[in-house]
Amino acid sequence: MMHKLELAEKVGAALKSKKLLLSVAESCTGGGICQALTEIAGSSEWFDCGFVPYSNSSKTEMLNISAALIAQHGAVSEEIAAAMAEGALATSEAHVSLSTTGIAGPGGAVPGKPVGTICFGWRVAGVTHTERKVFSGDRNSVREQTIEHALNKLLRFVEEA
């Protein structure tokens, strides 16, 4: 898999070529995706904004995700990842979005959701895609794997759009 900055460059080129703007909603990565994207010179041409709604209440306030939906599925779920991606689009000028929510560790595991559980959302061309992965390693490793996976899949979705 490509390194995150190489992926960010490719994502930027794909978005720019299609005249698309990106917004990002990331919880477990704490702004790491936005940082990688904005490392790229000229990213203002294709990057609109990023949200880091870490708490459940901030997901509700920033992205209009209902507290009932979070209570029903848990913050770490494909349903919330989808709602985050959709909320990031609805509250920005972007055309495309991605989201991450998960348990980077070392604590936070719950039954059925071990440390390393990450849920992703991508909204591209009017379609919301979600995925759940479980990564291994320490907190930093889980976060890095999450960033790379999110960008890798976003690149694929944008290229196919």
Image: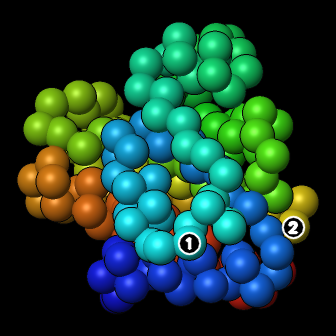
Image quarter in which the N terminus is found: bottom left
Residue 69 visible in image: no
Q: Label 2 crowding class (10 Å Cα cut-off): few <14, some 14-19, many 20+? A: few
**Does 1 sit left or right of 95 as displayed?**
left
**Quick check: 12 above or below 30?**
below
Residue 79 in the image: state x and y as whole percent: 65, 39
Marked residue nearer the N-terminal end (2 or 1) = 1
Image quadrant where residue 123 sits: bottom right
Residue flagged by tag 2: what amino acid is it?
A: Ala
Q: Which residue is mark 2?
A: 125
Residue 14 in the image: state x and y as whole percent: 67, 84
Image quadrant where residue 160 sits: bottom right
Residue 42 in the image: state x and y as whole percent: 56, 72
Image quadrant where residue 107 sits: top left
Q: Residue at x 61, y 61 (%)?
A: 44
Q: Residue at x 31, y 31 (%)?
A: 111
Of residues 151 and 73, the one nearer the viewer is 151
The residues bearing labels 2 and 1 have C-alpha atoms spaced at a distance of: 23 Å
- How many numbered marks appear? 2
Residue 144 visible in image: yes
Of residues 129 and 59, the one nearer the viewer is 59
The colour scheme of the drawn protein is: rainbow
Q: Residue at x 76, y 86 (%)?
A: 17
Given this view, does label 2 or label 1 mark the residue nearer the observer? 1
State the SS at label 1: loop
Residue flagged by tag 1: what amino acid is it?
A: Gly
State the SS at label 2: loop
**Quick check: 75 above or below 55?**
below
Q: Which residue is mark 1?
A: 42
